[in-house]
Every structure is written in C-alpha cells, then in structure tokens.
Amino acid sequence: MKFFVDTADVNEIRSLVETGFVDGVTTNPTLVAQSGRRFEEVIGEICELVPGPVSAEVTATDTEGMLAEGRHLAKIASNVVIKVPLTVDGLKACRILTGEGTEVNVTLCFSAAQAILCAKAGATFVSPFLGRLDDVGETGMDLVHEIVDIYNNYPDFATQILAASIRSPLHVVEAARLGADIVTLPPKVFWQLYLHPLTEKGIASFLADWEKTGQKILEN
Ligand code: E4P
C-alpha cells in the first residue's frame, strides 16, 4: 500500500518526507487556498520534495478548459498528475490527457458506477471520498470494497484505487484490509498512525527500570 499525503503545505510535506513513508501528494483547490500561495509555485516545490505522483487539480468545468489547464500544469514537472472531477467533461479530459501520456487522478468519486467509468476512461487513479460519504450517513468504506471487487473482475482495468477523504487511522487500516492501492493522508492522520498509549506507557516503564541499573549503553 502506498501513502500519499493530502496537503499543499510545503513545510509540512518536508517533515513528512523525512519519515521515509511519503510516496506521493494530493492537493485540491481548498488545500491550495489554505496555503495562501501561488498554485504553480507550490506544486513546483512539492514536486522537488517528492519524486512520486503529485496531484494538481483543474478548476475549469468544461473539457477544453480542463485540457488547457491540465497541459499547463503538467509542464511544471514530470511527476505532476492532473486531477479532474468525475463529470462527463472530466472523463473526456481524462481520456485525452491519458492518451497524451499524462497521468490523471479522477476525484470526487462517490459511487461504484462512477469508478467503472474512471477505469474505462483510462484514469491512473480513482479517488473515492470516504469521509465525505460517512458525513452524509453512508459507509464510505463500502464504496472502496465495491470498487476493489469490481476492478478485480477485470484485469484490464489498470486504474489504481486511491482512498481519499481519510479521517482516521481506522480508515487507513480498513482501506488496507480491502486492498486499496493508496491512501492519501491528511498530516494529522499520518502522525496518528504512530500512536498507541501502550507504546508510550511501555517506553516510560522500561526507562524507569533502566534508570535503576545505573548503566549507560554508551559510556563516554
Ligand atoms: C483527495 O485528493 C482530496 O484532496 C481529499 O482527500 C479531500 O478530503 P476532505 O474530504 O477531507 O476534504
């Protein structure tokens, strides 16, 4: 399973990269707005920090506009992935950009039917939004399950399942159990993956007992 991080905060990405666990990055217009910076500049810096796929989302809503924006953004770096919304125009743009050799992440996927369309349009990634489904009283993880089952029936479907809108470590674990290819993690959830109270408690008691021995592993 690959870990992408879901943020446009370059400083945050820098410290996440130091863990050695970051395989790629996803951004969206909201995250770019939160960064308060120029879109192209932010994407360029992220692409230098992370050699893996970096998703940059178009904001045009018609195919021609998405193609123009996508081609412009794809020039920033060779690892830019163009993110398009799951609409009729978005999937037309997906097919054309994919044909030009540009990787495409189809975002805002909320149904298995939509995920089938993504695969048929040749998307590199499909992003089912788990948390947002949970927010409206549906079980987001059921969608990942359905997509995994369907894609497994068709070996020619090469689209990777990128579980998005992740809200907790439990989402990560469940997505992994189901076989999602990638999860994209908000930094907060990424850091939560390390945590367990028994780990902290165990360290404290080991150190307290070690102190009693009066020993040091490295004697100066
Ligand atoms: C994915 O690519 C999106 O940027 C993201 O996961 C959206 O998550 P949210 O529902 O927490 O905004």
Image (cartoon, rainbow, N blue to C red):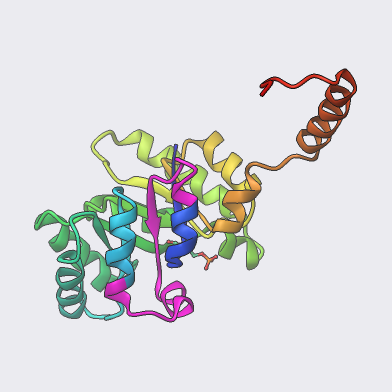
The quadrant in which residue 10 appears is: bottom left
Q: In which quarter of the image is residue 26?
A: bottom left
Task: Find residue 78 and report its image quarter.
Answer: bottom left
x and y, in percent, of residue 42 in the image = 34, 70
Q: In this view, does 167 lie above or below 34?
A: above
Quadrant of the rendering where the N terminus is positioned: top left
Q: On the rendered structure, is 102 left or right of 6?
A: left
Q: Residue at x 40, y 70 (%)?
A: 28
- Of the 4 image quadrants, the one containing the C terminus is top right
**Which is more toward the observer, 195 or 117?**
195
Q: Give the range drawn in magenta.
A: 16-41
Q: Is residue 115 visible?
A: yes
Image check: 4 left or right of 210? left
Q: Can residue 111 be seen in this view?
A: no
Q: Residue furthest left?
A: 100
Judge whether residue 131 is colored magenta.
no
In the rendered image, residue 157, in percent from the top left (x then y), is placed at 27, 41
What residue lies at 69% left-to-right and 20% top-to-bottom? 219
Residue at image location 13% in from the left, 62% down from the top: 96
The verdict on residue 38 being magenta is: yes
Image coordinates of residue 63 in percent, x first then y, are 19, 75
Q: Residue at x 64, y 66 (%)?
A: 135
Q: Nearer the viewer, residue 78 or 19?
A: 19
Toward the viewer: 29 or 84? 29
Horizontal and vertical percent position of residue 208? 87, 29
